[in-house]
Amino acid sequence: MADKAASPNGSYNDNGFEFFKGLVEPDTINALLNMTEQVAGNSPSTFRGIIRKSTLTNKLIYVLQGTNFVPLDTFHWGLTPFISRVVGKPVLPAYSNFRIYQQGDVCKIHSDRVASEHGISLMIGSSDNKPWGLSVGHEFIEDPMNWRGTGKVKTACDDFGDEPFSTFEMYPGDAVLYQAINRRHGRLEPNPNRWTAHLFMFWVDRNGPRKDQAFDKKRHPASANYTF
């Protein structure tokens, strides 16, 4: 496994990722987390989303799609101007989801689907306030569906192999923005908290080759219309 490296100097567009310490202030993320708990539940018997184990994790996680919960969807839209400024071009939301990971879980190293041009991983809560690192690889994957010209998809794996990477120790409010299609990422160390809550949001360039992935290929939200 490659050694953990410090974040390279430069911007998001130079590196393909950028760390934002305290991107969201505590009162805001606490309110968002509490609203989510009240609406979606907080236990296997009450949770209204999906409880599952994915190919990336080794334990059950709680998953709530952003489009199924208006505050999460609104928060996604609210961050869009900021992401456009960082990326340097206009972007549109693609999709988002809320997840609760439990103690001892990891997230295998992977890249995301085609709607994930620009992704942000935001920690919005933890039971014990212990940092849990997110690692992002330094290698740009030109075509994730054709790993290094082999014609084979690079499946999720336990580490980065010989690829250098950066690890960001995250507390609630911290976020990492990364080119989620073209940069492998994951969490190498087991979660030290009893649980952690995360919000994952993704965007595509408004005028780019993946613009058809905006709103997860659904129609643009209709304009409001009031009558009396």
Image: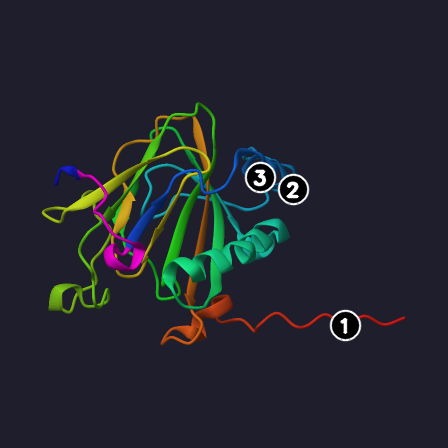
Task: Give the magenta part as a residue range.
Answer: 5-16
Of marks 2 and 3, the one in the foreground = 3
Q: Which disc number belongs to residue 39?
A: 2
Task: Give the position of the N terminus as an image quadrant.
Answer: top left
Q: Residue at x 50, y 60 (%)?
A: 81
Q: Position of residue 168 (x, y in %)?
A: 30, 38
Q: SS of the residue at dot 1?
A: loop
Does the image show residue 156? yes
Callout 2 amino acid = Val
Residue carrying label 1: 225
Q: Amino acid under label 3? A: Thr
User: What amino acid does circle 1 point to?
Assistant: Asn
Task: Check residue 63 for magenta coloring.
Answer: no
Label drawn at residue 100: none
Lateral position of residue 7 relative to residue 66, left or right: left
Q: Nearer the viewer, residue 30 or 10?
A: 10
219 lies left or right of 38: left
Whether the residues at callouts 3 and 1 have beta carbons within 8 Å, the answer is: no
Q: Point out residue 117 in the picture as x, y percentages from the top left corner.
A: 36, 63
Number of the label disc, if any, that sits on residue 28: 3
How are the residues colored? rainbow
- Crowd around label 3: few <14 · some 14–19 · many ≥20 (10 Å): few
Tell me the mark number nearer the camera, choosing from 3 and 1: 3
